[in-house]
Image (spheres, rainbow, N blue to C red):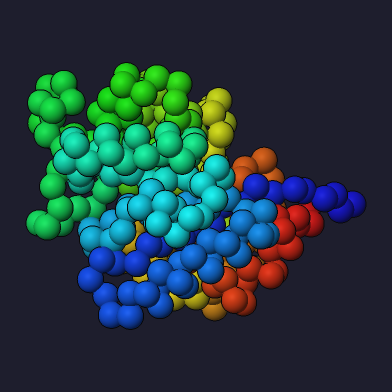
Amino acid sequence: MQKTIVRNYRVECSPPRQKVERLKERLEKFSLRFNLAEAHNLGTCITDNAMGHLAFQGTELLTELKLPAKRTMIHLNTFHSLNDLHWILDNCLALEVKELLIISGDGSPRLPRLKPSEIGSDKAAVTSVELVAYIVKFYPGKFKIGVAFNQYEPHDHELLKLKQKIDVGAEFIITQPVLGSHPEIDAILEWLTIPVIIEVWMSPKLELLKDCIGYNPTANLTKPFNPIECLNETERNYPDCNLYLALLDFDKQLPLLNSGVTQS
């Protein structure tokens, strides 16, 4: 028997890099994709210097392009000065952005990084754990804070980090991209009491996924990868979880989402 499930999809919108050719064209493309997601009743997620590449900040784009922000999730990593961190957070408040995804980030020599002493930490470096704790302390109740869970990392290490993130105030979790299912995600769903959002890889280019997560998750694939089939399988395996769609093809794949309503 089929039942209708109303999905709360979130789609990733990657900002243009700051030094690119045809910047105006790329900003227009970002705006078009963002508004398409809004028109399809989808949440939007704006990344923060992904893979260490210097890009426009999410709140900058929301402001300058006059985009609606209330259903937007802003990614925020540790590679910012303290002043810039507060500038971003204050802008989020002004724009009524409620959801943040806090990650340690990839970084690069061109990017500054928060110092532990600046945020009252005695750790050797600032990770997402310390950044979550800082935001919860200085912006209490202002944001709903999410964190990442990497199911491809060694079990004990990643589980310890996850529990530390929850202890300091994380309210939801987003996984790394899943190719249908993963036993580590199945395991945490057995005991977690906060929402888990499953990330789905929507690009046919699996070599990009390997570069993104640092592992080869495709070794057990028995047939050519089809992103829509992967999405459908993930929905069947995780009916109680919302989904985060990475590298969605807005032209070809967005109409297939049917405004977030799928059948299972």
The residue under the point 54% across, 78% down is 224
Left or right of residue 41: residue 68: left
The residue under the point 44% across, 26% down is 142
Left or right of residue 184: residue 5: right
Image quarter where the C terminus lies is bottom right
The residue under the point 44% across, 53% down is 62
Q: Position of residue 81 (x, y in %)?
A: 16, 41
The residue under the point 89% across, 52% down is 1
Left or right of residue 228: residue 4: right
Identify the residue at the far right of this view: 1
The reply to whether residue 205 is visible in this rendering is yes
Task: Give the vertical position of 116 relative to 258 (above or below).
Answer: above
The reply to whether residue 173 is visible in this rendering is no
Q: Nearer the viewer, residue 11 or 228?
A: 11
Task: Give the vertical position of 83 relative to 33 (above or below).
Answer: above
- Tally of numbered tags: 0
Task: Give the vertical position of 235 relative to 25 (above or below).
Answer: above
Q: Position of residue 213 (x, y in %)?
A: 34, 58
Q: Position of residue 243 (x, y in %)?
A: 58, 50
Q: Position of residue 84 (x, y in %)?
A: 22, 41
